[in-house]
Image (spheres, grey):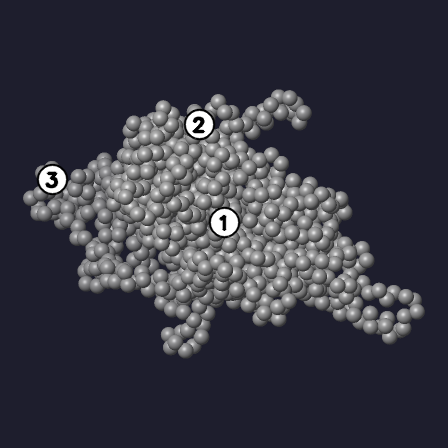
Amino acid sequence: KRRRTAREKGALPNEQISPADGLLALIQTMAEVNVEKFYERLNKIHAHFVRHSESTWHGAECLSIDKGASDEDNQYLKSTIIHHYLFGYELPDTVVLLTKDGQCVILAAKKKCAFLKPAVDQVPSKKGSVKSLKLLTKCKEDNNEANIDTMVGIIQGGNAENAEPLKVGVLLKEYKTNTSHKEGSNIAAWEGRIRNAGDIEVVDVAGGISVVMAVKDQEELDMLKKSSVLSNKVLKHGFVPKMEDIIDNSTAVTHEKLATDVDAIIEDPSKINLNVPTENVETCYFPIIQSGGTYDFRISATSNTDNVKFDVITVALGARYQLYCSNIVRTFLVDAPKAVTKTYDVLIGMHEACMKSMVPGKPLKHVYASAIKFLRDEGREDLVSCLPKNLGSSVGLDFRDGNLLLNSKNTVQIKAGMVFNLACSFGGLKLSEKDKAGLNDNSAIKSLSEFGLMIADTVVVKSSDGGADLLTKMGKHATDISYTINEDHDDGDDDDESEESDDGDRELAKKIAKEEETRPTGERRSNRLAANAVSAEVNEGAAERERKQIELMARKNEERLRELARLSKKKGGDDKTKKAEELETYKSTKNLPDNVLPNQVKVDMARQCVILPICGNPVPFHISTIKNVVLPDPDTAAYLRINFYTAGMAVGKDCPQNTLKLVQKYAPYATFIREMTFRSLDSQSLTTAFRQISQLRKSARQQELQVQEEANLVKQDKLVRTKNERVPRLADLTMRPVFAGRKTQGNLEAHTNGLRFISTRGEMVDIMYANIKHAVFQPCKSEIMVLVHFHLKNPIMVGKKKQQDIQFFTEVVDASQAVDGNRRSMYDPDEMDDEQRERQLRKRLNEAFKDFCRKVENVARKNGYTLEFDIPYRDLGFMGNPNKEMVMIMPTLNCLCNLTETPFFVVDLSNVDHVHFERVTFMSKAFDMVLINKDFTKQPWRVDMIPNEEKDSIQEWLTDMEISYTEGPMNLNWKSIMSTVVGDDRFYMDTEEDEVTQKEAGWEFLRMFGRDDGSDEESEEESGYSENSGQEESEEESEEEEDFDSEDDDESDFDADDDLEEQGMDWDDMEREAAADDKRKKRDGDEDDRPQKKKRRR
């Protein structure tokens, strides 16, 4: 099998890999050392070295980490691991010297010194114990004599007459084999001086470095999680389907061939539809697949050329993601007898006991002791002799750290953040003929006399006392790994059996059949294999989810109680309602306009008031007190009626908040003017007043809406533009939402503290890194666009509206295309060329957006901001209706979203308190999902018409995200429920106010809705869209009522009392009534009352 070269494995940046040696210089100049990470990890090593120099570091006075030439055959050299840990890359022929007083000296070639030069200028002055960094460039003229003298002088500290030999810490295993380095290299010159010096003694410090590197930081944990997911996916979607296919078809395949196929999947995860760059992944070791009675559980074992036997099959594989290792091992049982399954159950229990024993503060040997104790407590002391010498080791950049083995002697303390490959196995287990008595003669396991069992997982130690967490989460219980392809049978089938024996067999068969009907057997039955196992797995998965949900609901109730207590304590008495502000148009009558006449309706646009004549005196009324104004069609005279906001009647939703407070304030004792009507023979003056009043009301309303829009806006920092550096930029993007209803196109740039979008019309939108709550990059796969989306912490103004979601996208294909009448063949070369071009465009755009996101993350991190782009999980996506159409909804790490259609649907999972599933019945083909906000004053989010087959996967995902859920058969009135919940101070408690009477705590009461009543089921169409239809109607009403120019709307706002109904009738209604009266009288032949009617109209 071809192994990657040192350059491919990380001697150069992963994103710049090239096999061409001629590009070496170019690529090295493009590499950059992460200075912050370098000093953080170097300080971590130095601090531990200073504190524990006499114990863990064997009394060393300084550390010398020597990295020789790249070794393609040994990718786990300790020096190589340290270089990746510190620098991010491998730097061959380099010496790193670290003294107790904080001096760091690096001897390397010129290009490597140039690579490290940025770190020299950025030594943290206060932070950390490393005080200085000095680079020594390789000098060929004097064979590095001057550099070596400088380094010796530094480690001796000016005290050359010290009686005791100076102890220098080295990687002793590599130090002993470094005698063959070529003459003139840095390593040969430095280690040659140490060997020839009589006053220098070398000690091994590999153990100390292992202890320091064993505790992973957050970035390392993220890499290990991704690596573990990769190993898990390869086993689940790569190996298992191949193995099941081999068993189904009884195909003869060798262990080596199957291992080669699995290895190819690790090297190229796209074979199992994983979108992982191939340059970032490789195998930790060649996969080990064993069966047929020959089992070797050492990591040095190999897959032999024997065919796979359908008995006890073990598979071990490990993947590296960006050089971080993970490991997973599973044993699959085919036609296994009870003796094997019972032993396997013991192995599972021992594995779980070992995980629970990984408690911070305990020694590593405690894990091995816990395994032995578990076996003795289970009465299986006979299995102690079958245990391996160790149960795994620390894992990270190094696959197997020999200094941190989980054996019976290791005294190194377990710490939170350590990651281990926990490998539990039993070897050399005997299988007697008695154990195989009930097996089918065709079962391959019938020929086994000895077998082995092994399971291994990558686990991380938690900070609490709860033990370790799994990173490789593929199931390992009997239901996950057991297969039955040959039914067991009894040997007694002779015709001359007794009738009593026949009856016994018949009863036994009935009993077994009944057991299989009432409970899952835990075994797969081929296609044979998986057909009958599906229902068993679903039932068991649902039961397990239900158990976790009960625990989760109880824990969430306690957390929410503490959270609400903290919030109420923090708020204290700060909730002060804003008092009503008294209206003042003029301070005195002297300030009235000079051109005001005693009997004229005058509008003062500057003061926002209407001056009305009352008994010949001009009286100003603020525009916010006027409810509406009506100008009927003029007859012989013109009329203008003005209605005011008063107490004792509905003020309407358009009433200004300050006016509403004033009405409530003065309602108990003040007298209000409800309406005023003015008559004039000069219709032009009243028409002008009507137009000005309507215009003033409209502008005042818009000003108030704008104030409300900007009320909760947070002042943003000013964008600091990047200078003297190349700015990451994406060109020809379209922004949503748009400016002023027009398509907004332009460029997006990443600067020092935020992003700036500049449209082709010169419009600008600044998005600060500190204001980005979630950033999402959605590559184009089946959609028509590739996009980046920003969900903000605080809204910003885009045009005249505040927005919390900003998106930039590029269309891969036009959203609408003209289709001609000519149908094209699928084999048409032009059609195939178009498809090929479209695929290439998709790939190119995806790479461009991905590269931009990576650069933005780097710019943000460089300037002290935390920004990471999430990618939606397509395999967890489902169809649903969050607004008005069916769309694909996909979860990300922090959100549930649909970003391709507008309005955007983005639900921050941290704001979701509970999820309820509605219309979950056997009769319905779809269900609805309601996501309840932690802020009970806000209405829940809804997703309607989700297909029933998605329910299990959604509930599984919610359980993994630790979000509680319930389900019921009907739609609920959430407006009523939320109003009730808001006023319940004991909502999350399980007792009433007397603290004795029991009640459902939190959202547990939703489990009770509609369990016994199935007669009120609504049709899917009505229940699925009833909520939306109500929302659509309310939206349309609100849009219509915002039109202040509409006379009909103004009239409809008037809401008179019943006893004043005739008085409130407007002139249009009176005209229609009079016309109807005229027609009726004309029909009756009576025309004498027409003059009286005209008189009444006057």
Q: CA distance from mark 2 to mark 1?
A: 31 Å
Q: Decide: marks 1, 3 in contact (CB < 8 A)?
A: no
As rendered, which of 26 and 362 lies closer to the eye? 362
Instruction: Return the residue at label 1.
Output: 401
Q: CA distance from mark 1 to mark 3?
A: 90 Å
Label 1 secondary element: loop
Q: Earlier in the sequence, mark 2 or mark 1?
A: 2
Q: Is residue 1043 visible?
A: no
- Tell me the crowding category of disc 2: few under 14, some 14 to 19, or many 20 or more residues within 10 angstroms, Cα based: some
Disc 1 residue type? Asp
Instruction: Return the residue at label 3.
Output: 593
Q: Is residue 444 visible?
A: yes
Q: Residue at x 48, y 44 (%)?
A: 173
Disc 2 residue type? Ile
* Quarter holding residue 746: top left
Front position among marks 1 and 3: 1
Q: Residue at x 18, y 53 (%)?
A: 581
Q: Earlier in the sequence, mark 1 or mark 3?
A: 1
Q: Earlier in the sequence, mark 2 or mark 3?
A: 2
In the rendered image, residue 627, in percent from the top left (x then y), is placed at: 27, 49
Disc 3 residue type? Pro
Tell me: residue 94, above or below residue 412. Answer: above
Instruction: Return the residue at label 2.
Output: 27
